[in-house]
Image (tube, grey):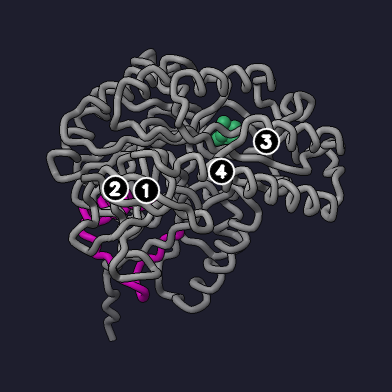
Amino acid sequence: MLMIMKTPKTFTIVTFGCQMNKSDSELMEVSLTQEGFVKSHPYADIIIFNTCSVRKHAEDRAIAHIIEARSSHKQSIIVVAGCMAQRLRQELRTTYGVDLVVGPYHSPAIGSIIKNYIQNKDIREYTSQDVNDFASRIHPQLVTHKDELPWHKWVTISHGCENYCAYCIVPYVRGKLISFPSQQIIDYCKLLIDNGITEITLLGQNVNQYGQDSGDIPFYSLLEKIATLSGLYKLNFLTSHPKDFNKEILLVMKDNPVIAKSIHLPLQSGSDTILQAMNRQYTMKHYYSIIEEIHKLLPMSSISTDLIVGFPGETQKDFEDTLAAVHTIQFDEAFTYKYSPREGTHAYTLPDSVPDTVKQERLDMLIQTVRDISQKRLMNHIHTTTDMIVERISKKSDNEVMGKTIYNHPIIIKGGKDDIGKKFTVTIVSLKGSTLYGERSA
Ligand code: SF4
């Protein structure tokens, strides 16, 4: 009897990790749709895991999903894309029965890669990091893909990182810095605005290094060109690196009201010894000089940061330096982490010298300090006027809506579903917990 094999047609993408991965998943969806595949959930012929390697926990979670999918969907093509694909490569096929491994350079071309796999079953691993194999990230068809907030769009401006912070796996899995051509980015932003997008967030591992690899315009010029496009309500950017952040960026922020007055500037540690061990390439003196400049040029802006406790060799004194820096700088918000070693990084070769109980104590103390300060910082906004974009109906009342101010603080005002996506000028009247309450200005 002649067996007729069904041609794989449907796909599903399971995404782990950061916003960069979410954007890559959108690109993969465009590529698969272009090749005639159809999105389906959850029983698809092709199951793609777009993975993250930043923390061991993230990899363990993805592996559990891969094992489950392999055993329950024996006929499906299992594909692993993203950072874990780049890091574990062949191991994913030999140990976990994955059919196809597609690293970040190749994932936007995944439609044709899978088509080739179905037809020829020849190539099963796409992990070259040759710049000629880098698939473009700016795709006009992404315009039709709606973000969670339908008026907002993430726009990736660069890929990869060459800073080699000692604890970070990103440079190994995402490769060297590749800045996308500025004119392409600007044209894409124009297209987004013409299609109703009013808020854009520019995205890169270190946006401040934009153009350094290609000789394109510097980041502050790109920021200015996008900020002056007519029709935009709000422009954000992520992430900055203190060694490359400069005064020109602040001047552009100051002169362009649509740019959110919110700066995320990862400090990681307040100790020069630890900063050096982390290969962060700046000192506390330099970091303080940026903060001083921010206060001078954008006195009301909010400053957030990332902090790691328990990096190898961190003494009690080093930790106290971090606490002191937090007190001096008065961060509006801080994302705090316990150091955990990542195989493949330089820090992995160092003895993990701080016991977990000590890491936890330091983390708890840091979180409490940050919370107290951020509460005080929010109080400073009461009786001030700011712009906000409404994001959703408040969880507490149908007559209230929640959004974010130009400083990216959550705020609640009276309103209804017709206000979602609209911009209002509001006066902040009170603070409850960590949420500001405001009233629309006349
Ligand atoms: S700047 Fe440092 S922490 Fe950020 S992605 Fe690059 S290596 Fe990792």
Q: Which residue is mark 4?
A: 333
Q: Which residue is mark 1?
A: 404
Instruction: Judge: label 3 CB < 8 Å from ligand 1.
Output: no
Q: Which residue is mark 2?
A: 389
Amino acid type at circle 2 is Ile
Q: Secondary structure at mark 2?
A: strand
The answer for how far apart the CA atoms under marks 3 and 1 are is: 24 Å
Q: Which residue is mark 3?
A: 326
**Residue 277 placed where, x, y %?**
76, 28
Dot 3 or dot 4: first in sequence order is 3
Is 404 magenta? The answer is no
Amino acid type at circle 3 is Val
The answer for how far apart the CA atoms under marks 3 and 2 are is: 29 Å
> Which residue is found at the position 38% from the left and 13% from the top?
215
**Residue 248 placed where, x, y %?**
42, 15
Q: Are marks 4 and 1 in contact (CB under 8 Å)?
A: no
Dot 1 or dot 2: first in sequence order is 2
Point out the residue furthest to the bottom here.
Answer: 1
Q: Secondary structure at mark 4?
A: strand
Amino acid type at circle 4 is Glu
Q: Are marks 3 and 2 in contact (CB under 8 Å)?
A: no
Mark carried by residue 62: none
Residue 271 in sight in this render: yes
Q: Secondary structure at mark 3?
A: helix
Residue 120 in sight in this render: no
Magenta stretch?
Answer: 22-49
